[in-house]
Image (cartoon, rainbow, N blue to C red):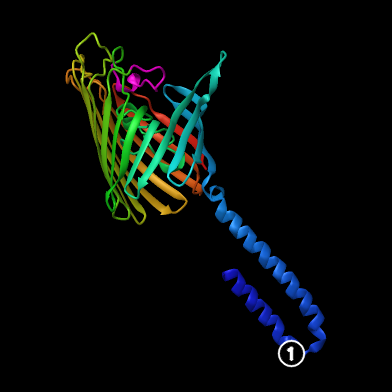
Amino acid sequence: MKIRIVALLGLLSIGLPVLADPGLKEEVSDLRKENQVLSERVEWLADKLEEDSSVTTQTTSIGGYGELHYNNLDSGEEIDFHRFVLFFGHHFDENIRFHSELEVEHVGTGGSTLGGEVELEQAYIDFHINDHKNVKAGLFLVPVGFLNETHEPPTFFGVERNPVEKNIIPTTWWEAGVAAYGEIVPGLQYDIALTSGLDLSSADKVRSGRQKVSEASAEGKLISTRLQYNGIPGIQLGMSLLYQDDVSQDTAADKVGATLAEIHGAVRKGPFGLRALYAVWDIDDKTNGYDEQSGWYLEPAYYPCEQWGLFVRFNEWDNQAGDSAIDSEIEQVDVGVNYWPHPDVVVKLDYQDQDGASDDDGFNLGVGYQF
């Protein structure tokens, strides 16, 4: 109907000058015929698109991120293309989507010089139930902390990911299973997941217990819950509670339970920002202090303009915190700067001063991107 009205107005606008100048009658007649043909073609195309609605719902997307690091530390000097990641997604329709993440670490694998890994970190189907409820099933990132789900280089300070989330949470951590997530009230989100879990039967530090869903033992199940609030602009608050009934993954022995409690918050007001996080594991039947593994960090930041950000981060973590007689605590202070020539491209420089069970000082330089 709209097309017909537009065509009619066009014909009227052509017809008015004709009354004043009869010599234009023949030219106007040709224009009217062309206008009629165009109108019929537009209407045919509109009807065709309406009949085949899949044209607008079936879409495939690609994205990714990467980062190159140069580390000059007491432990050694190194340059490494740390990560090259590709995202692939597909919308089957408006309610069913597929998400995946394929990562190459340290350039590649195999040979005498390539010691990296090729890893599938995400591959799941997402079902949209309504505006407040969603369900996903497959391989996905555990909902905990700042970086485990959002770790693209332009989104955080420092060349390397902070050592607390790396060694305690442990980022990046993915499992396979099913999850429900959504919004309870405006600004308050929830996540709950039932997945595979860690295997600490032959490992002490939680990071070494990641199975990465590679023919993983599934005797012990992980339940992950999270609440997160971002209803006030510039403020994000979150807490996670995770429980695994058996981190030994052994049917012949008594179950070894483990609990992770984590809380985090971020504030951004004008040129000032602040991030803070605390996480602690309580693991049954671990000796030599590994029954408790904990850490925290505080990261104030200053943004003199949109393209520059300065930060200082105070980190403290201990993978043997359960035994006070063991000097296993590590403290690290990071000071640095991020420069964003584009919102999705970042250049980073920072200096780290480490004390305690490990003493690895020096500076890091990096460049990263996302798309």
* Nearer-the-camera pick, 305 or 65: 65
Q: Is residue 334 magenta?
A: no
Residue 256 visible in the shown view: yes
- Tell me the quadrant of the picture where the N terminus can be found: bottom right
User: Secondary structure under badge 1?
Assistant: helix
Magenta-drawn segment: 204-217
Q: Is residue 216 magenta?
A: yes
Quadrant of the rendered structure where residue 136 is?
top left
Measuring 68% from the left and 78% from the top, which residue is drawn there? Answer: 11
Q: Amino acid at mark 1?
A: Leu
Q: Is 30 situated left or right of 55 in this image?
A: right
Measuring 75% from the left and 91% from the top, which residue is drawn there? Answer: 20
* Nearer-the-camera pick, 239 or 249: 249
Q: Position of residue 169 (x, y in %)?
A: 30, 29
Q: Position of residue 362 (x, y in %)?
A: 42, 29
> Among all residues in the image, which is located at the extreme bottom?
20
Measuring 22% from the left and 23% from the top, which residue is drawn there? Answer: 258
Position above or below: 203 against 8:
above
**Residue identified by numbered label 1:** 19
Q: Is 48 situated left or right of 143 in this image?
A: right
> Among all residues in the image, which is located at the extreme top?
252
Q: Characterize the magenta stretch by its predominant secondary structure.
A: loop
Q: Position of residue 261 (x, y in %)?
A: 22, 32
Q: Is 325 situated left or right of 229 in this image?
A: left
